Image: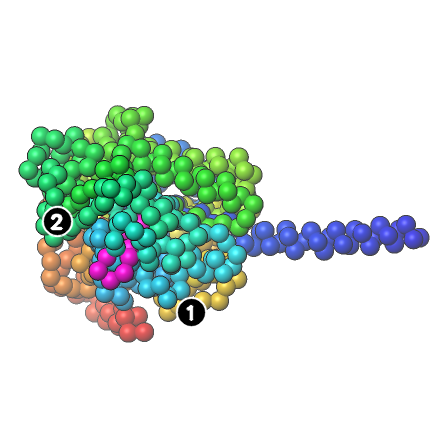
Amino acid sequence: MFQRFKFLFLASIGITQLFPLVCKAQSKPNIVIIYTDDLGVGDISANGASKVNTPNIDRIANQGLRFTKAYATGATCTPSRFSLLTGKYAWRKAGTNIAPGDAALIIPTNEETMPKMLQKAGYQTAVVGKWHLGLGPAGGPNWNSDIKPGPLEVGFNYSFIMPATGDRVPCVYMENHRIVDLDPADPITVSYKEKIGNEPTGKENPELLKLNYSHGHDATIVNGVSRIGWMTGGKKARWIDEDMADVFTGRAVNFIEKNAKNRFFLYFATQDIHVPRVPHSRFVGKSGMGARGDAILQLDWTVGEVLKTLDRLKIADNTLLIFTSDNGAVVDDGYEDKAVELLNGHTPSGILRGGKYSAFEGGTNIPMLVSWPAKIKSGTVSNALFSQIDIYASLAALAERKINSQDSRNSLSTLFGGKTNREFIIQQAVNSTLGIIQGKWKYISPGPGPAVNPQVNIELGNNMNPQLYNLKNDVGERNNLAEQNPEILKKLIAKLESVKNY
Ligand code: NG6
Ligand code: CA
């Protein structure tokens, strides 16, 4: 009798000790966001690309969920990233358009953010890769001392980043508050106004380039590639573009390994497939599509390394993985990398009109794959409307944290494969033109601006007249139905105005 009692007693302790652990582990998974740069809906084989093969990326879709109607909030990098991390539409805040490489930090340090919220929920948080949200106080950073505020001040425990973009100076890595490998005897200066120092530039010394620019990108030459902006110094610290995927992937894998036993959040913002596309030699020529296709293969390799790491550490089942892009596709974004000539029938934006920068769907309708083997059914396709603005509130719900956000809504059920709970989606084009989707209808507000950006060969969607498209049977946005549907037009305009005014 006593023995039996003792057994039950011990068993019940075991159960009560075990259960909270199991439940907690399942309700608060590790979170990895792989945020790619300029990847279009048509760029992955999971979405039907046949000229390029992305088996590792496709594995996320196979073991989870593939969205067909997921949206970045902006058609360029900085606004989309600002919205992702703050849950706030970038157009509510001045100074959130494409940031120069010497911009001050644009996320106020007293603002609640996704990484801060997750820290409070017990997560170790890291950003690895492209930042492009400014650094330092008003006036911009001093590159030669502690650079702050930056990622650590907005909620990351660890940061290993490129300050802006691959095509913007300074071309150096930054770890936490410091430039990596900076020699104090060779300090860095940066200018976006005029040439400084006497280093060669793409404009003056094109014979020194290993990759010619097609437009813009004619300032300081680093590693044989001329960039936007001028820099001097920091010679030992300068990156080698060919090694960048290995460097970032290595840091991302390290962070996962170090935190495999903690609860962690990794925001892994790849430099691929943004220009300059200078992949490692092991990918060069492998896609048959030039540097852009090779960069897609490199990106796929990166994703494979992350997946392998999660498998090896046996934490894949309990990791929520979100793979998506900051804006739509662009082919010639300023370098003669043969992306246009070698496209070979590949359609980076699928059947969508426009691309990066555009108010048309090609600007913000982006690839998005989500997996969490312990929770999400494998091989699911979701046609539900989803906006990246909701990732913040959804992760807050997952982490059981209360947040106060006017724009971000809890769409966790959609993220797990359920129907949409988005009444509308708002899109921001490069010139801040706003569009709104409600149900099957999409409205693009009228405004000045060229119809096409001839340099990148993308239709921007600018029009002095209001545009209204029925995305259900015209996802290519060919028939402007504004005149035929004044009531619907009125409704969408009113909705957009009301969101702008909250
Ligand atoms: C543009 C650059 C383009 C790219 C973009 C930002 C020129 C002519 N074009 O101004 O190459 O850097 O800014 O891209 O300079 S994003 O994905 O980071 O938003
Ligand atoms: Ca981008």
The quarter of the displayed image where residue 197 is located: top left
Q: Is residue 454 left or right of residue 353?
A: left
Vertical position of residue 195 compared to residue 495: above or below: above
Q: Quadrant of the C terminus?
A: bottom left
Q: Nearer the viewer, residue 368 or 417?
A: 368
Could one spot residue 245 in this view of the protein? Answer: yes
Magenta stretch holds residue 265: no
Q: Tag 2: residue type?
A: Asn
**Mark 2: secondary structure:** strand
Q: Tag 1: residue type?
A: Asn
The figure's colour scheme reads rainbow
Mark pair 1, 2: CA separation = 39 Å
Measuring 37% from the left and 49% from the top, which residue is drawn there? 176
Which numbered disc covers residue 300? Answer: none
- The x, y position of residue 446, in whole percent, is 16, 64
Q: Earlier in the sequence, mark 1 or mark 2?
A: 1
Instruction: Classify 10 Å Cα crowding around label 2: few (below 14), some (14-19), many (20 and above).
Output: few
Q: Nearer the viewer, residue 155 or 489?
A: 155
Vertical position of residue 460 compared to residue 378: above or below: below
Say which residue label 1 marks.
404
Instruction: Classify 10 Å Cα crowding around label 1: few (below 14), some (14-19), many (20 and above).
Output: few
Q: Nearer the viewer, residue 237 or 155?
A: 237
The quarter of the displayed image where residue 384 is located: bottom left
Which region of the structure is painted magenta?
130-140
- The x, y position of residue 392, in whole percent, is 41, 59
Seen as rendered, the residue at the extreme left is 204
